[in-house]
Amino acid sequence: MTLDPAACYKAVAARDRRFDGWFFVGVSSTGIYCRPVCAVKTPRFENCTFYSSAAAAEKAGYRPCLKCRPELAPGVARFDAARELADAAAAMIDDGFLNGADLPGLASRIGVTERHLRRIFAAEFGVSPVEYAQTQRLLLAKRLLTDTALPVTDVALAAGFGSVRRFNGLFKTRYGFAPGRLRAHAAPAADEGGLVFQLAYRPPLAWDALLDFLGHRAIEGVERRDGDVYCRTLRIELAAGEAVTGWCRVAQLPQRHALQVTMPPQLARVVPQVLGKLRHLFDLGARPDVIDAHLGPLAAAKPGLRVPGAVDGLEIAVRAIVGQQVTVQGARRVLGRLTERFGTPLAEPVEGLTHTFPDAAALANATIDALCGAGLIRTRAAAIQAVAAALLDGTLRLDPLAPLEATTAALLAIKGIGPWTAQYIAMRALGSPDALPAGDLVLRQHLRLKDEREVAAHAAQWAPWRAYAALHLWREAAALAQGEPKA
């Protein structure tokens, strides 16, 4: 990514949060690299060099700032299609993909050759994928050392290092001091049985709207809203069919422009995956300044509105199928029964969280009669089974890196899934910012248009952010009618 030094320096001098995570500044007089929002005295321009990634700054010999902590910078969601593949690879590395796989496997997953991946990755981030992964492991280890009381051995393994010796050596070589130096700053919350992390976002964030949406659709036993806090269960798939289950609690820290995530120690080995899923669920890579400006008056009532994503694509698909032509409350009842009968019980239930949402194997192997016993009609039960089976055999993926057009086409080929369902899944499971359930009854009635074609034509003005427009319209309709938006 090409950076304009003059423009970057202005952002640093202004501590402009819109650029947090988009670049890092290395300061030659200190040997430190910082986020553009760092609160220290602004360095002189001639001492600054700007990098598109933390890995590039570290490759140039800079150490991470202990005050602004580059590992806490928000993720980046870019809009240039030419960069999508490199961003997809980086997202998978951030989520720990290379901890259990190799570079050819990563290239295969995003659909390119290893050579092409190396080329586009270096052009975008200034380093190789392996160098990028190494920096992400070190930054995660730094985060665990600072924010938790996990033993150093557990920190090394959780961050993806094969041995403590390798971790200690690389940490000291790269940062100039031993990992134990950070141990004195471990978070007190870690001693109370929880691991605590922060996920930064670019303000504004309409946290109340996110909680309204998620809380209104909360599945009993899986998730709940407790005032200004969201809690839910998680199931993280590992290699060879192994899975780790647990829970998380998420609250807003508005003064820090961050979300605080608490999770139990048993999730330490899958911290990157958990944080990646939560970034997607809360749409933390969004650029509200860009989106709200494009939507104009539509976004004025609720700036910073995000499109709630997913921690599990199958869960969103089942929600969408169950929610066809029924109220939100009716769908919640069915989803709760499905969870109770086919979900995985937590070893230690906490605060009303008792089960993880059913996985693909559980739903694919259930009988149609058993699914119908939870309140489904046969066509919807069959559609859910078809989606689960396709996920199991690898013919379907429901995650932010799945190809949009091919995935929606595969969904539409399943009996019982129409355009509304496919677009809703694209909005939330695939994270498509321009997905639009144009056939939605609430959207049509609120816009006073007669059919799906007219809704699509009217919504063209909001492209490529039509998913955000749909969320704003649903909120407007609910406020005016005091009713329930669909799904």
Image: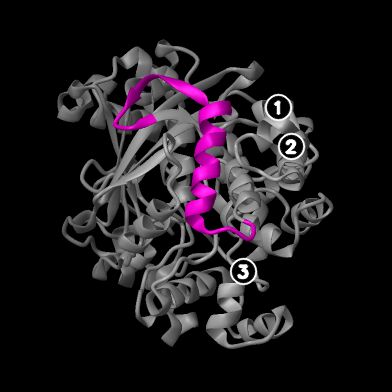
Report if residue 323 is visible in the image. Answer: yes
Q: Determine contact: label 1, label 2, CB under 8 Å.
A: yes
- Camera-side residue of 366 and 419: 366
CA gap, disc 3 to disc 1?
35 Å
Q: In this view, does 210 lie above or below 33?
A: below
Instruction: Count the marks.
Output: 3
Q: Looking at the rendering, in which quadrant would you find the C terminus? A: bottom right
> Residue at label 3?
434
Q: Residue 363 in magenta? A: no
Q: How far across and how far down the image is residue 384, in percent? A: 71, 41
The magenta stretch is 324-353
Q: Which amino acid does label 3 sit on?
A: Asp
Q: Which amino acid does label 2 sit on?
A: Gln
CA gap, disc 3 to disc 2?
28 Å
> Residue at label 2?
385
> Residue at label 1?
366
Q: Is residue 11 above or below residue 61?
A: below
The residue lying at 37 percent from left, 82 percent from top is 300
The residue lying at 61 percent from left, 80 percent from top is 444
Side of 257 relative to 344 (left or right) = left
Which quadrant would residue 406 be assigned to in this image? bottom right
